[in-house]
Image (tube, coloured by chain):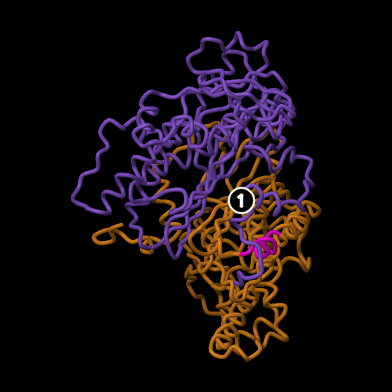
Chain colours: A orange, B purple
Amino acid sequence: MPTNKTNNIDSLGEFGLINRLTADFNLKNSTSLFGVGDDCAIVELNDKESLLITTDLLVEGVHFNLMYVPLKHLGYKAVAINVSDICAMNGRAEQITVSIAVSSKFPIEALEELYAGINLACDAFHVDLVGGDMSAAYAGLTISITAVGRIENNKITMRSGASSKDIIMVTGSLGASYMGLQILERENEVFKANSSVQPELDGFDSLIQRQLKPEARHDMVELFAQLGVIPTSMIDISDGLASDIFHLCEKSELGCQLFEEKIPMEDKTKLTALEFNISPITCALNGGEDYELLFTIKQEDFDKVAGNPSFTPIGYMTSKEEGKNLVDMNGELIPLKAQGW
Amino acid sequence: MPTNKTNNIDSLGEFGLINRLTADFNLKNSTSLFGVGDDCAIVELNDKESLLITTDLLVEGVHFNLMYVPLKHLGYKAVAINVSDICAMNGRAEQITVSIAVSSKFPIEALEELYAGINLACDAFHVDLVGGDMSAAYAGLTISITAVGRIENNKITMRSGASSKDIIMVTGSLGASYMGLQILERENEVFKANSSVQPELDGFDSLIQRQLKPEARHDMVELFAQLGVIPTSMIDISDGLASDIFHLCEKSELGCQLFEEKIPMEDKTKLTALEFNISPITCALNGGEDYELLFTIKQEDFDKVAGNPSFTPIGYMTSKEEGKNLVDMNGELIPLKAQGW
């Protein structure tokens, strides 16, 4: 395969590449309500409901390192991140397919661990494994999962639905998954240098758990329904708050103003970040893999969520001209930069 | 990853492995009508229609060789084999997602060729690309496609629906794809030995085309509807006639009797097989990748299809006790052996 005089894939990034490759595609079936460009595709079901479809690929050495990721956790996480995409459209995941390409060096027992984790996640998120494929591979492990879910038509929440002055909110807390990854990588380096040294993971359980076994926030989708709130826009935080608020702003053609002091982070995350000489806000903005839901609501809906410990208001949407900004601890306005992937 | 004292993946085969790994899974959602074990999963849509879901993985070095498979053809084939699974349930494919893991050594232009082939197939089979994922990989190219289709509830055709004495039929002709592969591999060996020798592909176009650019028989699904025929069971021929009739027999708990003289093969396929010292019937039974439809119909429906050049009757279903047999050219009864994958 010649690589000279041609464009390299890395030069475009994931989203640029997908946009370029799919630019010539058009939707032909009337049932294809929405294609590429949100957390899920939308397919017509009936007058009341639509189908949501999402798919994610996990590649060994790119998305996970089997030196410190147990296969059972990996299986769980692979399902969770797909269910999370369904949650990000305000839907309920119901079915998944799981395809695996794996080197024959893997013992069956290792695959059984992986599927035990997948099964645990199926129970936790109430989804059914309904199909898949299994292939040999020359090296490593690749996992491809597709999730299918349902959503009432009047509850569909897309990235593009926010309006100026909508309140920006986030579920749970941010940055812990990223710090969990830093700890695992540090101990892995220590282990590689001297395999007789036991890893120091004590006290970091909560952070490591967030990295290895993230939860899809399907409980938040249920809570929205209970509270009678339909977010105006929503995305799950996979690439980091900065990157994901960018998606909401771009698709809604708006700007935003976030407040650093409002961004929810656990003390353990902040302290560990400082121990690693990382600014805590960087973990939240650029860390990623939190799988919390980032969403906007109308101001008149704020009373429905105010004071609820599951949600934190962190800013509001502005006009596109005002740009995407963060007000830091000193009250300074700092332009946000998208990072991640 | 330890490989000693553990079971090796190869020892079980694809189906045995999937069965073992998914044995503990159960269906929890009432919308999950059918899971693992046919060409597609079935998901409830409404009183009239159901959703079909299927997924296939193509791995470089396992399923395709980029030494002689053009990327545009590969993209087309990757879609076709998924659409073929929807056809095998008597359904219409409508949406696909495409996920790609690819080494950064691939130039963007190569991926554009791949997607041009995917787009061609989307047009040919009237399906929409609605989502996907794109990831780096350390080496090679892996393609994961999921297809979603629809089927009227009274037309759902599963592997398990055949009855004893049903007539076994096949669309088109068999064995050509396998001989196309033999030619491509022969010329690839010649090329590797001496790269100045031009490949001799003249006169083999039809066979090579069947290997590189197979068609999903969605036209046959339309023809069934026109003729008012609903097959009692159906599968697409991906692993070879022997392996795929085994699936129909096993799922329907029946035996079968096939007649060698009835099995449709083009003269070009037979002659090329003989040139390669391969028994022509072996190409049809064990070659695979024909993507023709193998199906059974009730005897009283035979008048609707008799004489139609698209279909060939090749045998009939028998009781399980009678076994799975082929009557060869000499009238001898030979027990069939499943091969493939």
Q: Would residue A169 be seen by someone viewing this image from the given angle? A: no
Percent across and percent down for residue A332 are 52, 79
Q: In this view, does A63 lie above or below A147?
A: below
Q: In this view, does B26 lie above or below A205?
A: above
Tell me what residue is drawn at x 61 percent, y 72 percent: B2
Q: Would residue A101 be seen by someone viewing this image from the given angle? A: yes
Residue A110 is a magenta residue: yes
Going by the image, does A161 lie left or right of A311? left
Tell me what residue is drawn at x 70 percent, y 83 percent: A204
Percent across and percent down for residue A23 are 40, 45
Q: Callout 1: residue from which chain?
A: B
| Magenta part, dominant SS | helix
Q: Give the range drawn in magenta.
A: A107-115
In the foreground, A54 or B312: B312
User: What residue sits right under mark 1 in the picture?
Assistant: B13
Percent across and percent down for residue B149 are 60, 34
In the foreground, A139 or A56: A139
In the foreground, B95 or B225: B225
